[in-house]
Amino acid sequence: MMRLVLSCRVTIALTALLISLAPVHELHAQDADSVRLAELESRIEAVTRELERMQLGRDVVEADSSIQGLGPAASKVYRVNQGVSLGGYGEFLYENFAANREDGSGSGARNQADALRVVLYVGYKFNDRLLFNSEIEIEHAKESFLEFAYLDYRLTDQVGIRGGLLLAPLGLVNELHEPPIFLGTERPLTENRIIPTTWRENGIGLFGSGDAFSWRLYVMNSFNGTKFTAGGLRGGRQKGAKALAEDMGVAARFDYTGTPGLILGVSGYTGETAQGQELANQPVGGRVSIWDVHLDYKKRGWDVRGVVAGAQVSDVTAMNSLIGLEGASGIGSNMLGWYLQAGYDLLRTSASTHQLIPYLRFEKVNTQRGVAAGFSASPANDLTVTSIGAAWRPVTQVIAKLGYQIHSTAANTGVNQLNASLGWLF
């Protein structure tokens, strides 16, 4: 029966393709305008892609098939008619560090091979309006985490409500972090220290989309600001585990998706982080505000992306006192990071179905761009990273990456490294 249904679908798709092609001869005869031809080419490409997907089988996940802001494998539950959905991804990483820092002193860094993460997505679609989705992760072959777990209820075809342990909808990597969909052996530092990927908190909110845009608006428990450091906000994540909720935060995102292959958007977050603590009988706020502008473009063999992200922290002097930080170890009151990355598939015009993508990424991050009065900024937190590498995809769901990172800091303490990684999704 399944083969019969698949055969019927293929027949229908082929018929649609022939119908689409029929006017082409007439258009050539009439010297039709190029706009009409471009429309027909787009229709033919869409039908061909659907045929390929049906031939591969409905459970195969393409590496560019994101739904509701999630990665291709994470959004697999949205494609099933009803019942259980299983997916996942994984990543292995080898790091070879230079023996010396950029100032010539010994780095002391030791090479390592890491079973970085293996993830299982488990979802259940109750009906066309209600579903459950979750991500269970094992990191470094021994640490287990719940990355997200939520219920979606679709209020209309365009708007839904989501509640549970949610991924903060900021940047490009926090929601779209499956290895085959991004270049680079490691995630950008901007989306590690400024946007503390992977960042998830308990919350509830709305999501929606139209023909040319998507958006999300969440209320979430805020950071625990007493865990911040001079190196950024990452330590303040509560990850849904008995999270302090004296302070709440608001996260929002808007993306333009009207051009095929393009994501262009902005996102932001704000919330106090002291979680009810006082200093000298006075309440401390410790408000954190994060913003970013992001672009991702994948078309005609090009893979281009860029992010600019900043963060501001208020009541920094009081927060430093609560934590016991002094001198150059104080929390930055102003943080900024950005990167630009470009790659191109050298096999795009060949007969091969493989992809071979050399890439270049340039990044600057400073987590102490501003500090409180009486504190100093450590030049080691003013970092520049240049990454040169290549990625090979034998199929769109599997990737092998090799890259060399040139690290430089204002303190001349950077340590270069050669990385190799394997990643997959399904």
Image: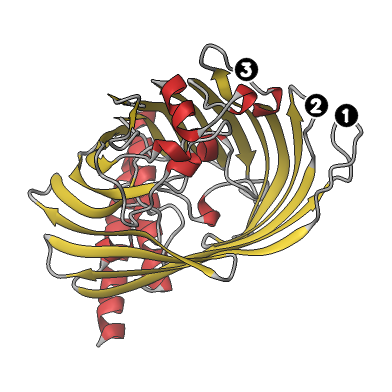
Circle 2 is placed at which residue position? 412
Please state which of residues 109 and 321 is positioned toward the viewer in this rendering: 321
Instruction: Decide which of tag 2 and tag 1 comes sooner along the chain.
Output: 1
Per the image, label 2 sits on a secondary structure element best described as loop
Q: Is there CB contact under 8 Å for labels 3 and 1?
A: no
Circle 1 is placed at which residue position? 103
Question: Residue placed farthest to the top in the image?
Answer: 373
State the CA–CA distance, disc 2 to disc 1.
5 Å
Placement of 235 over or under 111, stated as above or below? above
Q: Is residue 416 left or right of residue 318?
A: right
Quadrant (top left, top right, bottom left, bottom right) of the C terminus: bottom left
Instruction: Decide which of tag 3 and tag 1 comes sooner along the chain.
Output: 1
Number of numbered discs on residues? 3
Q: Is residue 398 visible?
A: yes
State the CA–CA distance, disc 2 to disc 3.
17 Å
State the CA–CA distance, disc 3 to disc 1.
22 Å
Q: Residues within 10 Å of mark 3 (few under 14, many from 20)?
A: some
Image quadrant assignment for residue 272: top left
Residue at the spot x=28%, y=69% of the render? 123
Circle 3 is placed at which residue position? 376
Query: Residue 191 appears at what percent x and percent y?
Result: 51, 38
Query: Residue 222 appears at what percent x and percent y?
Result: 31, 39
Q: Is there CB contact under 8 Å for labels 2 and 1?
A: yes
Instruction: Decide which of tag 2 and tag 3 comes sooner along the chain.
Output: 3
